[in-house]
Amino acid sequence: MLNVLLLNAYAANHAERLRSLLTTKWRVATLDERQPGAPLQKALREADALITTRFGTSMPQAPRLRLIQSPVSGHDRVVAAAIPPQCVFCNVHEHEIAVGEYVMLAMLEWQIGLARLDAGFRVGDWTGGVAVAGHMHGELAGKTLGLIGLGRIGRAVARRAKAFDMHVIAVTRTPRSSEEHVDSQGPMEELDAMLPRCDFLAVTCPLNDDTRGLIDDRRLALCKAGLVIINVARAAVLDEEALYTALRDRRIAGAILDVWYSYPTADNSAALPSRFPFNELANVIMTPHGSAWTDGLIARRWRFIAGNLDRLARGEPLLNVVSGPRLGPQG
């Protein structure tokens, strides 16, 4: 029987779900290595597979480990040099449906203002309706959506945006010869040329050395005054101070932000999401990194994880391989 270790609460909370989905023989164990005296060294020494969102150079040796499976898509918390040389590292997606729907909601809410209309009407304000010929709300049809990144999330957003008759343009590391739902695309080097064309800008690219601080003060100055930025990728793709000041000074119209510059910790469960008071800005909609956090996501992801463990047990090729072993095949 093979051993899989689910490390930290994010993975460990789904141990029973994983057990119910596996079709091969695995012993499923859970561990929180932050607990005083947690037997992490022993657990890793016995593990054939590890499910974790982070893996660094301080991790104990894991001589049997053949798979590190991330239960999330982003892998900026996994240090490549720390991965044991015999080990494969895989991630999981399955969040594109939820995030695609969130981006559409964000744009629709910005154009229509459903929450604002509801709040006003509950206290007798008919403004915004035909009865008093008040102010009109906008439409998505005809607006230009720019995408930074055209992976699974970017393509899911594009499909939905085209259904609303939007004009969709994109820059990506890997332009494809044909994307049915994208009107035009180019390499990342064409970002400066794309920005002035956008009414909405959705950030859907991974965070890496090339994308950190990608949208800075210089690039924000290229944008329309009416631009609305939607970030569902990683906060650090947008320079924190540059974004705040552009929104504060109304150099762009607004932002819908679901990813942040700091997060809760065990010692501070109510951490502020930024060193700048985005919460004081009326032109910002803020959510707590919840765009992908749906019941459908969890079910899809753990089916995939169980499938990868079954593939490992049967000696079959793994899916979503981020990096392969740095040694020859293990016995």
Image (spheres, rainbow, N blue to C red):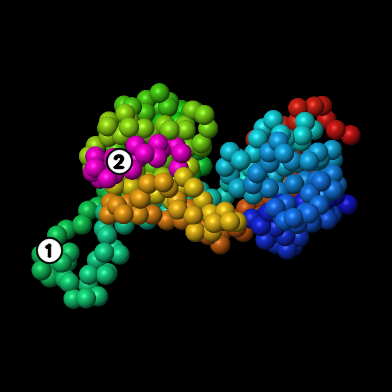
Query: Where residue 27 appears, x then y in whole percent?
Result: 83, 56
Query: Where residue 94 appears, x then y in whole percent?
Result: 57, 50
Any part of residue 278 in sight: yes
- Given this view, does label 1 or label 2 mark the residue nearer the observer? 2
Q: Judging from the image, what secondary structure is the residue with disc 1 in?
A: loop
| Viewer-nearest residue: 315 or 330 | 330
Up-down relation of residue 214 to residue 272 (above or below): above
What secondary structure characterizes most of the magenta part? helix
The residue most toward the left is 133
Label whose residue precedes the other's in the sequence (1 or 2) = 1
Residue 249 part of the magenta segment = yes
Q: Residue at x 71, y 48 (%)?
A: 51
Residue 132 part of the magenta segment = no
Name the amino acid type tagged 1: Gly
Q: What residue range appears in magenta?
A: 235-253
| Viewer-nearest residue: 190 or 271 | 271
Quadrant in the picture for residue 235: top left
Q: Residue at x 27, y 69 (%)?
A: 118
Q: Which residue is mark 1?
A: 134
Q: Which residue is mark 2?
A: 245
Any part of residue 4 in sight: no
